[in-house]
Image (cartoon, grey):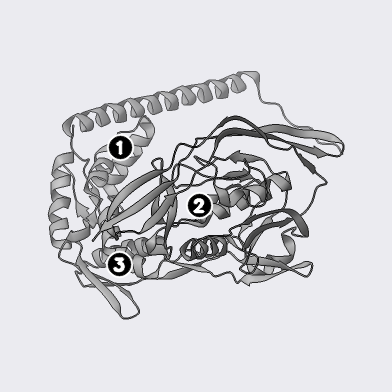
Amino acid sequence: MIKTKKKLPKKKKNSLKQVARSFFWFSTGAIITAFLLASFAFFIFEYINHNVVFPGITIDNVKVEKQTENQVKELLAKKNESIGNIKITFSLDSVTATVSAKDIEAGYDQDLLAKQAIVMGRSESFLSNINIVFQAYFNGLNLPPAYHYSEDKLNEILAPFIASVNKDPVDALFNFENGKVVTFKASEDGKAIDINKAKDDLLVQLRKLLRKQQLKPIVIPLAVQNIPPKITTDKVNNLGIKELIGKGASLFHHSIQNRIFNLTLAALRINGILIAPDEEFSFNKALGDVSFFTGYQQAYVIKNGKTVLGDGGGVCQVSTTFFRALLNAGLPITERHAHAYRVGYYEQDGLPGLDATIYAPTTDLKFKNDTGHYILVQTKVNQDLQQLSVFLYGTSDGRTITLSQPIITNRIPPPPDLYQDDPTLAKGIIKQIDFAAEGARVSFTRTVMKNGKKITSESYASNYAPWQSVFLRGTKE
């Protein structure tokens, strides 16, 4: 037997639709009315609390309602006065430094908190504002505390720790012997006070104390972090150092002992240095300070157009020899300066124009490592032959170098010898302090080829002034 649904009478169906429609419009009207009433109430509430913190809002459970932004600042400033008495001790092993919170201006961030409190319920979102105001009024709304301190004053407190602990990492230095790289100087980790951790610990400790409303002393143990070097000893086989790519040599016959000492010391300072791919090498930077304080002795140097005794005389023998190695390696030289006059030492084994002077910080010798691999610098001073050599090891990319013979033009004879009386020398003693040299313009070209193509062809020119011999004549009785 099949049952069929009974259909409602048409009249009754229309009546139900009418009731539903009426209920919808009634509900909509009620919602709109409620919204308008709530909006009106909110505007009245906002007007009453104009320019003050809304009721029910607290900062770190401290009432700030009905207060202006400046009043909130003043309230927090008074709390900071008592916080300022907290003693803070930074310690590392047996060394400590104790200051007050006031000394480093530690406490509530009154400006930030006052601004946050006054803008609560005053955003661009109307619904959000109503929600915040009602929540604060009926249930309360607590802003979490924010703290601050003076970075500069904290750094001053930590400066002695930093000075005693911080040490830069030392990159490994290598020598090339018997077809392989061996460690010349092992890499060393650097050390540094973990400043960020100290700052985080300070804020954590402040937060704990103020939450418990206790003003007990704070102790912050300082942490030391290791800083690994860029080039460690275990990377010895990953540097691409396989073969000799350039060599330079020069003689230093007739040099005084102080000059030999200085050039030997300077050669030792750059021995074993690694130059990274695409790095621009600075001779001055690699060599470091040249002075009495770094171990150099006085020998003759060119200064202000004169040859005088100065710290580090002879160092230019090393930069000159390094320049010759760069030329022979076909490396791009980005800065080079010739001496003011032709120095006899640099022409003992060749023609003029193959020298390079340095004088920090204005005069440097620089080149760029464009080989795609590390370059190892190795130096050798042969005291028997009185010869200095600079070797550059790396990976050859097949480039070949052709140096033209130097062309000497504009020759100018040296001025006559000059004798100067010196009352500090005994009478009859003659001492030569400057040596005659012919003035000239010297130029040569270097052509670098790779895979049958010319990479570069460049000219190097040196303008040497004529130089006279200067003698000191003793007059002391």
Marker disc for residue 339: none
Cα–Cα gap, marks 1 and 3:
47 Å
Quadrant where the N terminus sits is top right
Q: Are marks 1 and 2 in contact (CB under 8 Å)?
A: no
Would you name the residue on which mark 1 appears?
Answer: 121
Which badge, 1 or 3, comes first in the chain's sequence? 1
Badge 2: few (under 14), some or many (20 or more) residues near its Cα, within 10 Å? Answer: few
Count of numbered badges drawn on the protein: 3
Q: Residue furthest front?
A: 428
State which mark lies toward you, 2 or 3. 2
Badge 3: few (under 14), some or many (20 or more) residues near its Cα, within 10 Å? Answer: few
Q: What residue do we see at 22% from left, 40% from top?
A: 54
- Looking at this view, is 26 or 92 the one in front? 92
- Looking at this view, is 354 or 410 the one in front? 410
For residue 287, above or below residue 217: above
Would you name the residue on which mark 2 appears?
Answer: 285
- Looking at this view, is 186 or 51 the one in front? 186
Q: Secondary structure at mark 2?
A: helix
Q: For this view, does 413 lie left or right of residue 36?
A: right
Which badge, 2 or 3, comes first in the chain's sequence? 3
Location of residue 400 (image quadrant): top right
State which mark lies toward you, 1 or 2. 2
Q: Residue furthest bottom?
A: 94
Marker disc for residue 160: 3
Residue type at mark 2 is Lys
| Residue 371 in sight from this viewpoint | no
Q: For this view, does 2 lie left or right of residue 61?
A: right
Location of residue 451 (image quadrant): top right
Residue type at mark 1 is Gly
State which mark lies toward you, 1 or 3. 3
Residue 78 on image: x %, y %: 12, 54
Q: Secondary structure at mark 3?
A: helix
